Amino acid sequence: MSEEVKKVDNKRTIDPAALAVLEQKGGQIETAYDRYVKMQPQCNFGEQGICCRICLQGPCRITKKASKGICGAHDYTIVARNLLRMICGGTAAHADHTRHMAHVGAMMLEGEAPDYKITDLQKLYAVADRIGISREGKSDLEIFEELVEMAREDLCRFEAADEEAARWVSKSIIPERVKKLEDCNVMPRGVFGTIAESIAQTHAGMDADPVNLIFQGLKTAVADFCGEHIATDLSDIIFGTPRPVVSEANLGVLDPECINIAVHGHNPLLSEMIVSAAREMKPEAEKVGARGIKVSGICCTGNEVLMRQGVPLLTNFISQELPIMTGALDAMIVDIQCIMPGIRAVAECFHTRIVTTSGNVKIPGAYHVDFVEENAMDKAREVITLAIEAYKERNKDRISIPQIKHKVVAGFSLEALLELFKAVNPENPIQVLTEAIEAGELRGVVLLAGCNNLKRIHDENHLTIAKGLAKNNVFMVATGCAAGACAKAGLLTGEAVEKYAGDGLKKFLYRLNEANGLKEDLPLVFHMGSCVDNSRAYDLMTLMARQWGIDTPKVPYTASAPEAMSEKAVAIGCWCVALGMPTHVGVYPYITGSDLVNGIALQIAEDVYGGYFMWETDPEESVDRILASLDERTWKLRVHKQAAEKYETALSTGW
Ligand code: NFS
Ligand code: SF4
């Protein structure tokens, strides 16, 4: 048993609000923090990825005595197959979300989803232009129709080699990357087809070649990028592209005077409706003696409504059971993904209603209201009525809300970021960022992404890394539960810049504050949205590459998932690498059981794609390694630029 496992207790968090709840009620009411302790020690075979149970002869585990599975599969085949299946799980989850968005788009066109409309025409035009839809002589609805059709094609195209590449990939990334993906045979045509192909490839008795399996994994991950990008674009068109917004985060946002509703999951199709219905239903809340209805968010649906509507963020993934334990939450309305079944048992000890809304996410014992898009607002009202009923049963004596919350400045879509840069450089906004890196004011850009994972102390890796990078003048964007961690800890504020930023980062951000004449200072970390919005973060890298005229593996831009947990995070990490980013992960993935597969992730990937993985669990070390990955690129970029100027040649395309 490792040292780390020995000192495990059930208060593994550095979020003071979460800790307050755990100290008061932890142990009496079982949460993930308790179950993590009970689960120790965890299985070593699983941990290393060398357990196979994809056929009924298994489980086969690789040991000294048995170095191959019964069918003769080596460790490297088993590890690579398991990894590919994880990537499929993540890609399928995002694609399911995207399919839903595209389906609602199609329903809107048929007049079957009257509560949804095109909110952002500029975004519609921008996406149409990028994807290659001619707008000439077409009405807005006709453009939208073509776009939805194209999105469905990207999702549904067969994987025949003579078919067109997925457009949301081939038209969103730089031509050099398109060529690389095509040359390596990892350019997907259709998202669902790629998933089917991969699952087939990993069936017993199919592919045994680890390299072939891993390349297929990268192709599937690029299909994941495609799905995510479509989801972001359609959400922006339907609900509006985020603009800077001020709100709050952490458990202290719960208001004992109000009916408190948490929206949890990932899909803005439902949460946006809940937010509007809640605003409308204030009189009903007043009738039962509440001051109003307060909606707050958990996980990525929380990020979606924070970014667009300024709805406060309650908490992130691993602490999702804790808001119920404050006794002040009347309903938790969940849609899809990252919903721990454990919330139901916790709610049993309180008056809180857990309401599931999606046909593929049900929890035994929870309320289920099937969310149908034809009458979305009616359905939203129906679930809010459940919360109002629950409020009447609230026991005031059991309410204990930690008075901890922080201001949050969020809403930084790429469009919003460029708007800020424009105030400094109206002709070429992205140059504001690239020049600051060239001048050495900034060390590079880091995307803070991913989940929570109790293998690490809740939020500790996120916050230590964010603060460490800030001190070293790194410009940071964040998504998902990483952004949630920063929000809860007050890092999405101007005050955090004052406190944690190095001189270069301070100068850079203050220059932007001044040029924009903002009421609210810009934050230390820029919240770009939910996990599907990692597509925004990659578009930023693409813009930087275009500005410098280089391929992405030369751009000083690193991704970090300090507390990665889900299969979705695995898929994202893999496309980050395939699309040219160094990618730090703060938890070991299940591949260390094969030196060969691990070596591909850590080293060979760089030779082929320019991106590579770094596993590092210690947060301080992680900061050093992330900085080194940026510095290597900045240094090379400078050398190549100097050489190009001196010899009057084009910039070297290698990395
Ligand atoms: Ni991303 Fe968002 Fe959080 Fe992880 Fe889950 S909510 S989609 S998967 S846990 S960051
Ligand atoms: Fe064992 Fe091979 Fe079956 Fe896997 S596929 S469970 S390694 S026999």
Image (tube, helix red, strand yellow):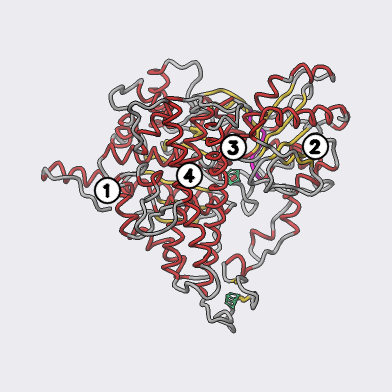
Distance from Cα at disc 3 to Cα at disc 1: 34 Å
Choose top left, top right, bottom left or bottom right for residue 612: bottom left
Q: Which residues are magenta?
A: 312-317
Front-lying residue, 361 or 193 = 193
Q: Assess whether residue 169 is covered by the magenta stretch.
A: no
Q: Are marks 3 and 2 in contact (CB under 8 Å)?
A: no
Front-lying residue, 294 or 228 = 228
Left or right relative to 130: residue 236: right
- Residue hosting label 3: 484
Asked whether mark 1 and ligand 1 are closer than 8 Å, the reply comes as: no
**SS class of the residue under badge 4?**
helix
Q: Are marks 3 and 4 in contact (CB under 8 Å)?
A: no
- Residue hosting label 4: 152
Task: Tell me, yes or no, if residue 310 can be seen here.
Answer: yes
Q: Amino acid at mark 2?
A: Arg
Left or right relative to 8: residue 97: left
- Residue hosting label 2: 353
Disc 3 or disc 4, which is closer to the eye?
A: 4
**SS class of the residue under badge 1?**
helix
Residue depicted at 51% across the width and 28% down the height: 411
Q: Is residue 313 above or below residue 160?
A: above
Q: Are marks 3 and 1 in contact (CB under 8 Å)?
A: no
Is tag 3's residue or tag 4's residue first in the polypeptide sequence? 4
**SS class of the residue under badge 2?**
strand
Instruction: Measuring from the top left, give residue 546's x and y in whole percent.
Output: 29, 39
Is tag 3's residue or tag 1's residue first in the polypeptide sequence? 3
Q: Characterize the local packing of mark 1: few (<14), some (14-19) or many (20 or more) Cα atoms within 10 angstroms.
A: some
- Residue hosting label 1: 636
Asked whether mark 3 and ligand 1 are closer than 8 Å, the reply comes as: yes
Task: Tell me, yes or no, if residue 625 can be seen here.
Answer: no
Q: Amino acid at mark 4?
A: Arg
